[in-house]
Image (tube, rainbow, N blue to C red):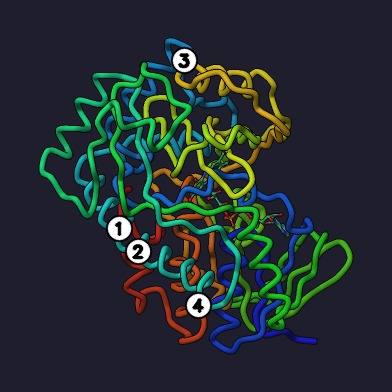
């Protein structure tokens, strides 16, 4: 039986692409090696932060991170490896982190951030998906005077629709558990947040109810191709044929490697700790502890903190030392309270060197589409990217006919 569209990988990229394609009247089959309960798209912070939060490839980060790494205090680490791919990635990353590129990236983030926010809101308000999506902005809290002063220079001209500088004695109104040791805070009003696990489960439910086919617990390991197209894909158990194939396998590049597509991408390991805390101490909105690289998001029944970015690590273990170091940093700036029902988690960001996703049609195998490289902001841009892929598939476009692909895809960023 030949299928219409097969999507391999059911993270946020795969599920939002399926959602868009179903809405466009197409038939979708989603294959995943697991059962859609615990990918990177589940355990992340759920902060949808396209606005006023610098990209990873920004000039300040390279310098500050190197400084902290030398002191052994950095939340960002690079795992030494013999794999030369990582050095290519690092080279591109350092070259991408310049002021011109930063301006361009921020503008693209704004454009696609609005599209994603509106899409999530529609899923919640019109299709009835319970995402716990909240438009309450993001509080950026600074624990270092120097970085706060520097940030204030960027936000010297008042713009009440976009941000508000929060006086020190008012920070507790946003995050009651904070101590007086923080230096200051800015409330960025356009960012949003949601519960990623809830979102993924709701998307899965909606897709099932609306006719998507799910094939779970099957790892696709082979691709059969002719000169110009993919003929079939196979797991150890079955072979599947379709008119169009979408690869959205997160940080795993095995299938792209099979068609000789050398994606410049690296796994970047991170952690989350989810727990219950006294209601009166919970933050009102998502909070970025800017200098600590910690995000805290309130959810309906609990809160989550996330941190760490270990470049090149593929170790699936939860390393206790890392969890303890996150807690230790967090506790330096919060009043004592008991974390209850703690759930620790680790996952891998599919990180590109320039914050651009690797999306688009394969130049050789025309029925193959990539939805890869969503990076550290994959939840933020999932629906916007899915809509771009849907246009490509439904209108049978080549990459050169899609302004969005040319603008936003990492395949078209010149030397960056
Ligand atoms: C600690 C942490 C915090 C984060 N916080 C945020 C945040 O606040 N905001 C934000 O926007 N983003 C955040 N991110 C990033 C975001 O989570 C990712 O960008 C996003 O989840 C990636 O989605 P994906 O669909 O590409 O991959 P995944 O969610 O990894 O999904 C890929 C799927 O493909 C399947 N798969 C892989 N290979 C195969 C195969 N061969 N056959 C079949 N199935 C396969 C896997 O089982 C998996 O289900 C965070 C990430 C981390 C780690």
Q: Is mark 1 within 8 Å of ligand 1?
A: no
Q: Is residue 203 left or right of residue 331?
A: right
Packing grade of label 2 (10 A; few <14, some 14-19, many >=20) is some
In this picture, is 83 found above or below 200? Answer: above
- Asked if marks 2 and 3 touch (Cβ < 8 Å), the reply is no
- Asked if marks 4 and 1 touch (Cβ < 8 Å), the reply is no
Write down the residue under mark 1: 110
- Asked if marks 2 and 1 touch (Cβ < 8 Å), the reply is yes
The disc, 3 or 1, on the residue closer to the chain's N-terminal end is 3
Q: Quadrant of the N terminus?
A: bottom right
Q: Nearer the viewer, mark 3 or mark 4?
A: 3
Say if residue 413 shows up in the picture: yes
Q: Is residue 359 left or right of residue 166?
A: right
Q: Give the number of the disc on residue 390.
A: 4
Say if residue 221 shows up in the picture: no
Q: Give the number of the disc on residue 225.
A: none
Query: Circle 3 — which element?
Result: loop
Distance between the Cα atoms at labels 3 and 4?
43 Å
- Asked if marks 2 and 4 touch (Cβ < 8 Å), the reply is no
Distance between the Cα atoms at labels 2 and 1?
6 Å
Distance between the Cα atoms at labels 2 and 4?
18 Å
Write down the residue under mark 2: 114
Residue 386 at x, y percent in the picture: 50, 69
Query: Circle 1 — which element?
Result: helix
Distance between the Cα atoms at labels 2 and 3?
35 Å
Q: What residue sits 65% from the left and 75% below the top?
A: 230
Quarter residue 96 falls in = top left
Write down the residue under mark 3: 73
Residue 33 at x, y percent in the picture: 77, 57
- Asked if marks 3 and 1 touch (Cβ < 8 Å), the reply is no
Distance between the Cα atoms at labels 4 and 1?
21 Å
Q: Nearer the viewer, residue 96 or 276?
A: 276
């Amino acid at each position: 039986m030949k299928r219409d569209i097969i999507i391999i990988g059911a993270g946020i990229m795969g599920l939002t692409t399926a959602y868009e394609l179903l809405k466009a009247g197409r038939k979708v089959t989603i294959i995943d090696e697991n059962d859609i309960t615990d990918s990177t798209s589940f355990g992340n912070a759920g902060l949808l932060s396209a606005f006023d939060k610098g990209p990873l490839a920004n000039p300040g980060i390279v310098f500050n991170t190197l400084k902290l790494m030398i002191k052994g205090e950095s939340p960002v680490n690079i795992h030494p490896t013999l794999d030369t791919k990582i050095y290519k990635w690092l080279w591109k990353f350092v070259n991408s982190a310049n002021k011109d590129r930063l301006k361009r990236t921020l503008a693209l983030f704004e454009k696609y951030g609005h599209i994603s926010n509106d899409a999530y809101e529609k899923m919640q308000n019109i299709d009835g998906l319970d995402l716990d999506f909240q438009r309450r902005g993001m509080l950026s809290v600074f624990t270092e005077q120097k970085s706060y002063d520097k940030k204030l220079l960027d936000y010297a001209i008042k713009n009440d629709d976009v941000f508000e500088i929060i006086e020190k004695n008012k920070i507790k109104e946003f995050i009651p558990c904070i101590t007086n040791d923080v230096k200051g805070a800015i409330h960025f009003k356009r960012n949003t947040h949601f519960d990623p696990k809830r979102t993924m489960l709701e998307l899965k439910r909606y897709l099932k109810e609306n006719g998507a086919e799910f094939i779970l617990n099957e790892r696709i390991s082979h691709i059969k191709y002719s000169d110009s197209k993919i003929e079939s894909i196979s797991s150890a158990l079955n072979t599947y044929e379709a008119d169009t194939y979408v690869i959205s396998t997160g940080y795993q590049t095995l299938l792209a490697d099979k068609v000789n597509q050398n994606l410049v991408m690296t796994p970047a390991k991170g952690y989350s700790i989810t727990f219950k805390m006294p209601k009166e101490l919970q933050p009102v909105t998502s909070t970025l502890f800017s200098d600590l690289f910690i995000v805290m998001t309130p959810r309906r029944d609990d809160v989550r903190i996330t941190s760490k970015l270990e470049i090149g690590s593929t170790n699936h273990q939860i390393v206790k030392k890392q969890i303890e170091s996150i807690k230790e940093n967090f506790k330096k700036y919060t009043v004592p309270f008991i974390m209850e029902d703690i759930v620790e988690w680790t996952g891998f960001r599919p990180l590109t060197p320039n914050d651009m996703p690797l999306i688009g049609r394969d130049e050789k195998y025309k029925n193959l589409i990539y939805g890869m490289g969503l990076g550290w902001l994959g939840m933020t841009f999932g629906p916007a990217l899915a809509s771009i892929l849907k246009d490509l598939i439904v209108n049978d476009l080549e990459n050169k006919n899609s302004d969005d692909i040319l603008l936003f895809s990492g395949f078209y960023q010149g030397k960056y």
